[in-house]
Image (cartoon, rainbow, N blue to C red):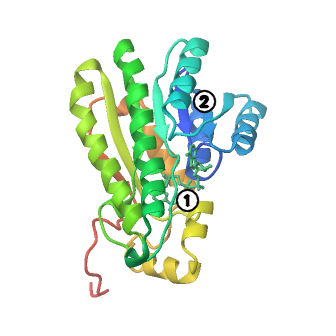
């Protein structure tokens, strides 16, 4: 069996019940971490925790709404009470409410910000307070390529992801002297439930992306879990305030005319 590189680290994965958060929870557990799978929907979180336990790993499931400060505090406090510390906080919980910019309502705008920005803020701040006391810890936010480039129907979503990138950079300097890092993963398209629901014409959206991804494929949840592993690992001890695009080259690439 290969060496477990997160052995005994204590990690909270928000949005861990499915999609990218599920893949990351499974990867962390495989690397020896104790994983708290936190999700608005407790049932899928319980299935992920059970899958980990059935495989010999350590995990528990909790219901968590990341928009509620008292709930985030409770999850961090109970994790620390049970395991003595918190090493990693990864914030996959998010929503993607796509629609034309000119039709975006105040309600959609607000909901998008509540979950993606306020949720990230609360998880990062409350985790950081604990990690600063410990003098160590890793916070990993989840932004998007859409926080850096525009996409049709993605105005409110992309704006929240741009804010997550700004939050990551803003927080990094104050916590760095205490041994705590914060970095962001900016995933490219991965066909999770969120992606399939937000991209109502899956074929058109897939084709739209593929024209801009020189690596020639959409992402897999494991591509994102690999990045989440790296950012939590010892190999990443001198990196903070960074945005790691995991996107098959989407952000780096401009014009593609196929003339080589
Ligand atoms: N899939 C992609 O292509 C893609 C691309 C870029 C960024 N992302 C980001 O990655 C993250 C995960 O996306 P995914 O594709 O796995 O989506 P998903 O919808 O499959 O999973 C999101 C999870 O977050 C949970 N959640 C939603 N609101 C919550 C709340 N208030 N509190 C706690 N949990 C909540 C959901 O229950 C769900 O389990 C999101 O932040 C998303 O914006 C995804």
Residue 192 visible from this viewpoint: no
Residue 21 against residue 211 in the figure, above or below: above
How far from the left and from the top, in percent, is residue 148? Answer: 29, 62
Residue 29 horizontal side relative to residue 214, left or right: right
Q: Residues within 10 Å of mark 1 (few under 14, many from 20)?
A: some
Spatial CA span between label 1 and label 2: 21 Å
Badge 2 local density, few (<14 within 10 Å), some, or many (20+)? Answer: many
Image quadrant containing the N terminus:
top right
| Towards the viewer: 163 or 229 | 163
Mark 2, secondary structure of its residue: strand
Q: Secondary structure at mark 1?
A: loop
Where residue 176 sits, quadrant-wise, is top left
Give percent across and percent down for residue 144. 39, 57
Position of residue 132 measured from the top left corner of the image (x, y, whole percent):
34, 18
Q: Which residue is mark 1?
A: 220
Point out which mark residue 184 bears.
none
In this rendering, which labeled residue sits more in front, label 1 or label 2?
Answer: 2
Q: Are marks 1 and 2 in contact (CB under 8 Å)?
A: no
Does the beta carbon of the residue at mark 2 sit less than 8 Å from ligand 1?
Answer: no
Q: Residue shown at 39%/13% (left/top)?
A: 134
Relative to 78, residue 98 above or below? below
């Amino acid at each position: 069996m290969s060496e477990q590189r997160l052995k005994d680290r204590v990690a909270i994965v928000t949005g861990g019940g499915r999609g990218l958060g599920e893949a990351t929870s499974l990867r962390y557990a495989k690397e020896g971490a104790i994983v708290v799978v936190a999700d608005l929907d407790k049932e899928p979180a319980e299935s992920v925790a059970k899958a980990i336990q059935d495989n010999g790993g350590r995990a528990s499931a909790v219901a968590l709404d990341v928009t509620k400060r008292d709930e985030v505090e409770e999850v961090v406090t109970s994790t620390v009470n049970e395991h003595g510390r918190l090493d990693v906080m990864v914030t996959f919980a998010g929503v993607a409410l796509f629609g034309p910019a000119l039709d975006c309502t105040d309600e959609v705008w607000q909901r998008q910000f509540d979950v993606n920005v306020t949720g990230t803020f609360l998880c990062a701040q409350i985790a950081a307070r604990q990690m600063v006391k410990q003098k160590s810890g890793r916070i990993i936010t989840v932004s998007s390529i859409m926080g850096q480039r525009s996409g049709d129907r993605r105005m409110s979503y992309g704006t929240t992801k741009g804010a997550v990138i700004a939050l990551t950079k803003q927080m990094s300097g104050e916590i760095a002297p205490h041994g705590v890092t914060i970095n962001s993963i900016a995933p490219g398209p991965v066909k999770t439930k969120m992606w399939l629901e937000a991209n109502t014409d899956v074929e058109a959206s897939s084709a739209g992306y593929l024209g801009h991804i020189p690596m020639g494929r959409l992402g897999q949840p494991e591509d994102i879990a690999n990045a989440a592993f790296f950012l939590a690992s010892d190999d990443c001890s001198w990196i903070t305030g960074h945005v790691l695009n995991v996107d098959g080259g989407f952000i780096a690439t401009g014009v593609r005319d196929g003339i080589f």
